[in-house]
Amino acid sequence: MRWEAGDLAVEVLFSQRGVATQVLVRAGPSWFLLDAGDGALRDLLSRGYDPRRLCGLFLTHGHADHMAGLYGILGFLRAEGRRGELLIGYPAGCREIRQALQGFQACYGEGIPFAITELALRDGDTVRLPEGLELLAKGVLHWDSIQGEPLSPAPALGYRLSFQGRSVAITGDSAWCPALEELLRGTDLALIEASLDEDGREMERIHLTLSQARRLSQLAKAAFLIHRPDGRTLRID
Ligand SMILES: [Zn+2]
């Protein structure tokens, strides 16, 4: 599923609850991946996108379906001899992503031909990126869980990217919280998780229902409802 406005292009490469989400954002010459679940590298390559062109990855939280593809991308970039800087943004306090990066660096150390710049982000942080692109991080409500049983809060962020007067926002995984409205209001494109078909316990701390996601989509000019159980992205104009 693709969306374009001017020099800003957004493509949902894949998104299915519990499996993976990866979204490619191209802002002029600057390419970013929002989340990198299983198969992120394969999804880029199979569509003809050269992963070496990525300036950075911004990961919403540490659950495997949002970050399990990170290691594969790093390994590919190393093997291909990519140079320069690679930004990796993630929620401050996220153990899973920190440890994956630490593991990669511990294994290869000086043998990594590019520089990894880690950005441990907190609610309200803004990052100035190449080509006048700006990123805002917004803390959202998402708990770690097993079989829908909430265990503990997970550091989780939504992101808004602004470029040449246009903006795209992604909720990451989040139950309903006021931050979602602030994140999505007035954006040109909203990528909203809609993991649940029905109301239930998970909607309190873990995920949005389809009807909650549809309501939130009204805050944006256009929206994709992603991270559905069946892997189908729904477009709302
Ligand atoms: Zn999650």
Image (cartoon, rainbow, N blue to C red):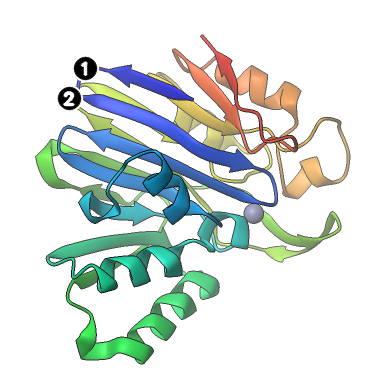
Residue 166 shows in the view:
yes
Local crowd size for mark 1, using a 10 Å CA cut-off: few (<14), some (14–19), many (≥20): few
Distance Cα–Cα, label 2 vs label 1: 8 Å
Q: What x and y, as percent, mark residue 124?
A: 37, 48
Residue beneath the point at 72% across and 49% down: 206
Residue beneath the point at 32% across and 19% down: 4
Q: Secondary structure at mark 1?
A: loop
Rendered image: mark on residue 164: 2
In the foreground, 211 or 44:
44
Quadrant location, ligand no. 1: bottom right
Q: Is residue 190 above or below residue 237?
A: below
Ligand 1 within 8 Å of the CB at mark 1: no
Whether residues under marks 2 and 1 lie with C-beta atoms below 8 angstroms apart, the answer is yes
Residue beneath the point at 23% across and 80% down: 112
Local crowd size for mark 2, using a 10 Å CA cut-off: few (<14), some (14–19), many (≥20): some
Rendered image: mark on residue 94: none
| Circle 2: residue type | Gln
N-term mark: 2 or 1: 1
Taking the image as shown, residue 21 lies to the left or right of residue 165, namely right
| Circle 1: residue type | Gly
In the foreground, 117 or 37:
37
In the foreground, 134 or 196:
196
Label 1 sits on residue? 6
Q: What x and y, as percent, mark residue 56?
A: 28, 55
Residue beneath the point at 33% across and 43% down: 136
Taking the image as shown, residue 139 lies to the left or right of residue 178, namely left
Q: What x and y, as percent, mark residue 80?
A: 23, 67
Q: In the rendered picture of this protein, how many numbered marks are placed on residues? A: 2
Q: Quadrant of residue 116?
A: bottom left
Taking the image as shown, residue 93 lies to the left or right of residue 206, namely left
Taking the image as shown, residue 38 lies to the left or right of residue 231, namely left
